[in-house]
Amino acid sequence: MICHRRLLVVILSLSGFFLQSCDGDFSPKAPFEQKLVVFSLLSAAQDTQYIQVARTYDVEGFDPFQNRKAPDVTDAEVKVITDDGSVILFQDTAIQRENDERYGIDGHAFMASQFRVLPRTNYQLEVTSPTYGVARASFQTPNAIGIGHLADRNTGAFTVRATSFGAKGFLIRLYAVFTQDQDGNLVELAVEVPRSILNDGTRIYPDVDRLSIRSFSGDVLAAVRGEVITSDTTDSVEEIGMRIIVWSLEPNAYNYYQVSRGFNDRFSVRVDVPDFTNIEGGFGVFGGLLVDTLFVRAL
Amino acid sequence: MVVKSRTLLILLAYSVLLIAHSDVRCQTSFGSVQGVVTDSTTGETLPFANVVLEGTDFGSATNADGLYLISRIPPGRYRVAVSYIGYQIAVRDVIIQFGPSSRLSFALTPEPIELQTVIKTGSRFRRDDQTAVSIHPIGPEELSMVPTAVETDVFRVVRALPGVVSTSDVTAQFFVRGGGGDQNLILLDGMTIYNPFHALSLFSIFDADIIKYAEFQTGGFGVEHGTRLSSVFNIVTREGNRNRVAGKASASFLAGKILVEGPLLFSTGSWMVSARKSYFDGTLKKFVNQPLPLSFYDVVASSTLWFSDSQRFSVHLFVSGDEVRNASELEPNFQWRNRAFGIKYTQPVSNDFLFNVHLSRSFFKGELQQKSSDVRPVESSVEDLYFYANLRSIVRYPNEFMLGFMYRIPRLQYSVINAAGFRVTVDDAVSEAATWMRYKWEKPNKFGIEAGLRLNFLQLVEDVQYAFEPRLSARYNILPFLTLRGGIGRHHQQLITVTNEDDVLPLFEAWVPVVSPFRPEQADHYVAGLESTVWLDVDLSVQGYYKKFRNLVSFNRDKIDRFDPDYVQGKGESYGVEILVRKTSGKSYWWISYTLGWAFKTNNNVRYSPRFDRRHTLNVVSLVRLGKGWEVGLRWEFGSGLPFTQSAGFYDRLQFTGVFDSTYVGEVGAPYTILGPKNRARLPVYHRLDLSLSKEQRIQFLTITAKLSVVNTYDRRNIFYFNRSTGERVDQLPFLPSLNLSVSF
């Protein structure tokens, strides 16, 4: 009986003690640290390059859309240093956002003109903001792109092979090029050839891939040709050749591009999208792309 | 080559068995007594009853089939006494002679409710002649003593044992000694049940009234058990009443159930059917702020035919279904179903061996349907055809043997819309086989050693992989009241569940096979401990464990594209100390279990604590039988905070849409949550007190039991999870009283 009383006392004491306990030190949020967020893919396709510099942000609650203040960073010094020691300074520029729902239409980016990336060159980025700190990153562009092709006369298939040492990924696009007589003027018509056409008619176009070789089947090419010809009411369409456009991506650009698209893997069972960054002291990506084109005249 | 090595192994095993068997036959200078212990009213066998020769040290406990055998007894006249919880002690005389074993069976009479107190069961003899480590028998007393949410729950008993961590009240899933939730083998009459949990965890998926006994082993388990890394929970159902038609009906304000049982073919057999159905809707919402439209059902049916005490044939069926229909448009609906069917045959081979054959088919299917989308749901299913044959000796001393074989063909399907937006369906059939043998040598009351080897043949269809699993356990009685135990063993697992460990709450765990080029997951167990009777009826057990995991499958955090695998194999380790103090007789029965444990996983070169790494776990469980059918039960559970990953702000992430066509400048990024160091933070501590009060009353041929239970007596707000995107805090079960009324006849 005494034992039962003791047990009861213990229970009541414990109950009282734990009724008072609280979760004061618990927070689902770690201390927020403001960091720079840098996005830039320098391209050999244009002479004007952009670097978008922003910052991380936090909100009072948990919904990031509570943040309506554009996280653009405008007070930074942004420069890219090349192999030969050249320093390219990027200037703060006003840009227009694609949609104005969250932050309004006016945005900022850093821009440099007369700057086109070259093959096999190192580029070092340094972003210094008096408010948000320093972010650094670097990459090396791949070697210049070489393009080879093979047309199989039996099957009608067209195969493209790209080479670009140092590249991790390629985007190989093929366009069937036609001319059409429009009121006496010969107009060029280029139709992208899909990688495949599904039974329901859905067209799957080439995407960035680690493979440097891409084949387009004769059936797909025939379908594209047939479509152009049947839609031609002037009866003047003439196929003049194939245009091959090859992009080569250095590893950082490739990695970020793929990860942000769910690994671009149609057979993966993963539903998560992890992060990739090569920015020291921040987030985002700094990478580069080369591009080359080859026109193959129809025989 | 494969065939040769297999044949060689089988020949070797049989040679060992024959040599050992001849050794048994040489033990003819002593006599023995054997028989079966049953319930006189139902005819059901009673497992783990104490059988002793009064005035001697000879004794034994009945095995799972109610059979006992006491050997190496000097010839003479003895009194055999048999005791079992809730039954009157039976005593009979026997004359032991040289040569053939004397047969003596007992039919125990249940003790009237008014006189019932908790008495010691067969645990002492089981413990004394057992070499296995970390084994927890769960009998009627353990089942009845843990206060229940609504009904008696075998999983709540498990969660109160040392080494077991439970991460929430809302799911009955548990984690053993740093192992994952998928690493627990749950067997119901030999059938593997893949997701043995009902929604909200208020009800066990297995009705306690159908359970004859259960054994839960948290480490170093025997060679007959494989395919899982961390624990084996073996549940055996009752055969049913062999003497008359009986039944039980009960109802609470959440669910109702009915159980009917009776004899078959002039008491040469029996049958039993139990069915439950919930009617949560409209009742739970009174206690929980938001509506919880949950529903479940389960049905268990079995039938057994006896050809002799130890020769029998049984058929088993288990069906369950759960549905969770979230009211919120943003929350998905879930449903899952279990189906299992099995047949078992037990045949004695001479007087020394029992041969068991088991064939079963298990099926599990889970679905998660996002309401905001009309696409097909995420689905995971397992269909498992399983054959098992085992030959074991029933001789207690000095030798015991076992030889067995199993073959299974699990087919797993997983269908999901992946991160790239494509529906992916994976359909794998991965057959596996295993053979095992075990030898146990005993020096009564002093020393025992058990050595076994299990050889697994995995992925039989393609690229066969061999996995050797040596197992060794030993017992040494340092003093009559102090026993040292130890065990080591290797275990492999081919069927696993994989989840995104960054999710605050993994909603859906799909079963997938570990196929080539991956190796099956592996765990090495090292266990050592001391057991002692520190006071007349108080036992103390202190056990330390170390587990080393290899080939643990996790999401590949370094995956970039389709050329990288979805998963990587990493490693892990866990270690800790468990203390169990238990009072096992008298009117009050209690145990206190404490576990101090650490668990770590390493993959992609990151070492972190998995979400079930709980440093301190304490359970206090007590049952006081006040007499005249009154019982008071208590359970208090304390757990230190579980790991989680904090959010550390956001940034807007660009997709670079249009980078190859025009420009990405001006693209507005989508918010991306920055996560803090993986599982570095801890949730608040968990504690909860459950109480129950019950009264059993017999009125003519009816036994009426009323039970008042209170879950979370002091209404502690234990956090379940927080929603990372809304910050909403979801708590576990609040103060929840319930009243259950059952009538049995």
Image (cartoon, coloured by chain):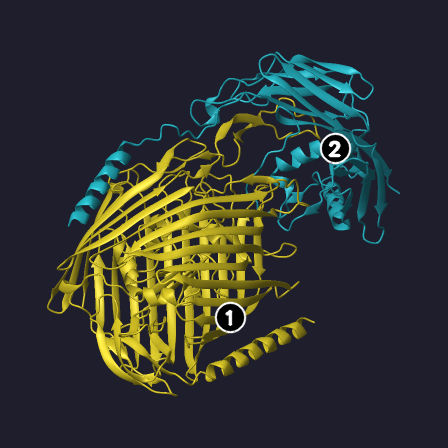
Chain colours: A cyan, B yellow
Residue at horizontal 76 percent and vertical 34 percent from the top: A248
Q: Position of residue B602 (x, y in %)?
A: 57, 43
Q: Is residue A58 above or below residue A292?
A: above
What count of labels does the image hold? 2
Q: Is residue B12 above or below residue B556?
A: below
Q: Position of residue B210 (x, y in %)?
A: 30, 65
Q: CA distance from mark 1 to mark 2?
A: 58 Å
The crowd level at tag 1 (other Cα within 10 Å; few <14, some 14-19, many 20+) is: many
Q: Is residue B276 above or below residue A63?
A: below
Q: Is residue B698 left or right of residue B418?
A: left
Q: Residue furthest right?
A: A299
> Which one is in front, B169 or A60?
B169
Q: Residue furthest left?
A: B700
- The residue mark sitting in front, 1 or 2, is 1
> Which one is in front, B415 or B618?
B618
Q: Is residue B468 visible?
A: yes
Q: Is residue B169 visible?
A: no
Q: Is residue B200 left or right of residue B365?
A: left
Instruction: Tell me the chain of label 1.
Output: B
Q: Position of residue B308 (x, y in %)?
A: 35, 83
The crowd level at tag 2 (other Cα within 10 Å; few <14, some 14-19, many 20+) is: many
> Which one is in front, B473 or B176?
B473
From the image, tell me which residue sits under label 1: B438
| SS of the residue under disc 2 | loop
Q: Is disc 1 in contact with disc 2, using a CB cutoff of under 8 Å?
A: no
